[in-house]
Image: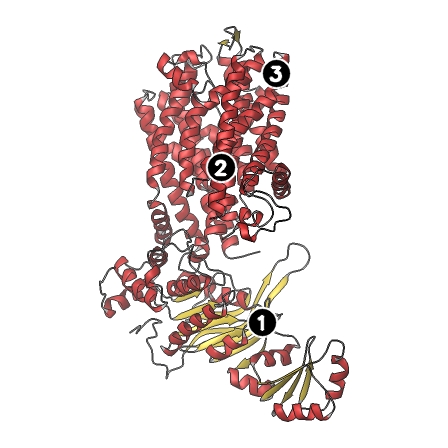
Amino acid sequence: MPGNLGGVSSSPSAPDVLIRAHGLVKTFPKKHGEAFTAVAGIDFEVRRGEVFGFLGPNGAGKSTTMRMIGCVSPVGGGHLSLFGLDPNTQGPRIRARLGVVPQEDTLDVEMRVRDNMHVYGRYFGLPRAVIRERAARLLDFVQLTDRAEDKVEPLSGGMKRRLTIARALINDPEILILDEPTTGLDPQARHVVWDRLYRLKQQGTTLILTTHYMDEAEQLCDRLVVMDKGRIAAEGAPRELIERYATREVLELRFPLGEQEQAAEKLAGIGERLEPLPDRVLVYADDGEAALTEAHRRGLEPVTALVRRSTLEDVFLHLTGRTLVD
Amino acid sequence: MSTETISAAASAEATERSRRVPGGLVLSWRQFLYWYTFFYRTWRGTVLSAILGPVMYLTAMGVGIGTLITHGLPDGVTYLSFIAPGVLAAMAMQNGIFEGSFTVLGSVKWAGNYWAAVNTPQRPQDIMFGTAMQGLARTAGMSTVFFCAMVGFGTTHSPWSVLALPVALLTGAVFLFPMMAFSITLDSDQPLTVVFRFVMTPLFLFSGTFFPWQQLPEWMHPIAFITPLWHGVELCRELTLGTVTATSAAIHIGYLLVALAGGVALARRNFSRRLYLHR
Amino acid sequence: MTSYALQPRVAPRLPGTFGTRRSLRLVERNIVSYRRMWLMFLTGALEPVFYLLSLGVGLGQLIPNVTGPGGAPVTYVHFVAPALLATAAMNGAMYDATFGIFFRLKYGKVYDAVLATPLTPPDIALGELTWCLMRGGFYAVAFTIVASFFGVLASPWAVLAIPAALLIGLGFAGLGMAIATYMKSWQDFEVVNLLMMPMFLFSTTFFPLGVYPRGLQLFVEITPLYQGIEIVRGLMLGAVGPSLLLRALYLALMALAGLAIAARRFGRLLTA
């Protein structure tokens, strides 16, 4: 029934490129001292119908990149084009075809839910009747129909985020941009948002999202780039990246306080690679159970031992030596 | 609940049309319509004070204080007729300053509606002009009510009087844009209070509104001449008293227009800087 | 939301009683939060001075002597200065009480945090009142010093103008605080303005009572600002009589009533 929510008209078999970035740079002049480079020359392409992700920790340059894509921050250097248009000169025409869900909800908290949809749709110059019809359909899609006449202020964080998503779809955008769509939400609210985004993906909507949650990136993204300190560290499909930069499984070991360093020395040689973290040691091995047996054989007695599959977190750790969420 | 259905074709056509972003002030007009929707629910309370305020003001200042005044005014002019045009211009200034303050700061700081608008075809200058249009519309409304009160109190002595209304609006605009330019840079409302008390109140009190500027000490005269409010007050007064000349009108209007152009340029620049994060 | 059950109870006490020492903690909070706002205090003190210069000195040149409180003629600057002190006390207290408290109630969530400590709703009411009074006192002293340069302090009684201004502030802070607890949105400030503007304009601030017909005079005489202006004018110009005490009583009762209502409403709004 939601039919054409994301509004993708051309067939997915012709993967045309919607966004093209080459050597993209953004530098902010610092008030004292030298300039701060938030984005330090990145290349990427986003194709129609795919879900493209920017994965990285806070301060990696994801939001700045998103703001340039959203044409609300002038391109600082290099090349960026959306739909073949230049964001620096064609901002309004590009934004007319985008839907944006910013990191902070920018809802009119003193207005009613339905009014928020209305005033936003009017910015695009959509006729009232069209907005009314779409608002009803979109509010239903994000499960807010029974809150349509309520003010926004008392809504929960998850509801506000869903409303922001519905609002961003009012102009039938060709690309939906989401900056950290579930940051700050509780686990249950996150799953509801993921479910809705997954449906959009199923309908073929082109989505771009930033996240520092590896599970979010793994579940939703067809393709992603791993960003760190304004640069792209790796690019590919989630599974592909894991296969490239991590083993199939990971053994996580915790030791009593003060004993970890010794234990790490004893572990040397088990698996393909060791990664000692402040609170635990990660052993990268294709067979985690076998690695654990070997650790026990060497007389190690970890407080806890966990075997799991590798994730994007491990990819990031390998590429940067740091964790995604600190 | 509306049960209306829009055909997929009609909906697609609306989308198609929305992609052809219009030029000129159409985008600014959409921002104005936002404010219209926003204030639509609350206009009643505003209208009441907008009407009662001028009536009380003219009664107290013009009639009340007028009974005490014996000398110092231009020949044959009552105190009521003297201050009414002054207050018309001064209130337009106050209105301009208020409209350029909390509306802008609230939008960028608390309500977030500017941050929503930048993700639509709206450009910073559209957001700025649209907000200014609504501020000017309200200023025009308030000024019109005050002007009607002036007519009711018999303070309009010349057919030129009717032009005092656009001049007052121009005066309001001269203050609205710089105030918007200032407010958009802020993160708290404390500096606004300082501007109200340190800039607006002295202007209100010393720009020849309540007593002839000739009463000010000699050294203050040049200061009065460079304040746009003084020009607005003088011209409004010349128009309602019928003493206006082509030269004086040209000087006052010229000065106000130059100040307006400066304010608009500053507001455009600051809106773009803040909303596009040129930190 | 916030409940008494969540409050740590260090010593047994009746909930909802006034604790003066505890109220001072709230005053301390406000001092800390306003500490960096010195510019605001400076401009607040200067605003009535601008009025004095404009009306008393500028406009005063057009006005011959006016009938003073004792019936004796006084210059216009003598007439208007006490009124400006009184209205400044009213404005300051009203805006602080209505605007400030409404904001803290609705958006700041300051009181929710405060009530999670041993402070009670009446402590908040009393603390806020004390705070308003401190600011009012500062403004009153500043204005009186400036006014003395204009030679408008004609009598030794004028020293009492400062506590009188504080009493006016107290009365209106109580009133404003009570009103603030009933306000629902920013639009309600229009109503506050509609109450204050006529008082500001007509309570013999700018011209004597004699201008009005008798019926209107009675109307003016019952406004609290008129009482305040009469007290300050009497003290500054040396026309002191027992009637001033009666007027002071009026303002004191208004303060108490406002405080009592606000304390009850704070309790209802914050611990519901």
Chain of the residue where label 3 is placed in the rendered structure = C
Marks 2 and 3, the one that precedes in the sequence: 3
Where is B266 relative to A165, above or below?
Answer: above
User: Can the viewer see residue B215?
Assistant: no
Mark 3 element type: helix
Q: Which residue is mark 2?
A: C262
Q: Which residue is mark 3?
A: C158
Q: CA distance from mark 1 to mark 3?
A: 73 Å
Q: Position of residue C8 (x, y in %)?
A: 61, 51
Q: Nearer the viewer, mark 1 or mark 2?
A: 2
Whether the residues at callouts 1 and 3 have beta carbons within 8 Å, the answer is: no
Where is A261 relative to A118, above or below?
Answer: below
Q: Quadrant of the image for the C terminus of chain B?
A: bottom right
Amino acid carrying label 3: it is Ala
Q: CA distance from mark 2 to mark 3?
A: 32 Å
Query: Residue at (31%, 73%) from the top-left corner?
Result: A4
The one of C108 and C248 positioned closer to us in this rendering: C248
Amino acid carrying label 1: it is Gly
The answer to which image quadrant residue C82 occupies is: top right
Mark 2 element type: helix
Q: Position of residue A140 (x, y in %)?
A: 32, 67
Q: Which mark is residue A41?
A: 1
Where is C46 relative to A58, above or below?
Answer: above
Amino acid carrying label 2: it is Ala
Query: Residue at (41%, 15%) from the top-left corner?
Result: B66
Q: Is residue A199 left or right of residue C59?
A: left
The one of A112 and B246 positioned closer to us in this rendering: A112
Q: Position of residue B71 (x, y in %)?
A: 46, 10
Q: Which mark is residue B257?
A: none
Q: CA distance from mark 1 to mark 2?
A: 60 Å
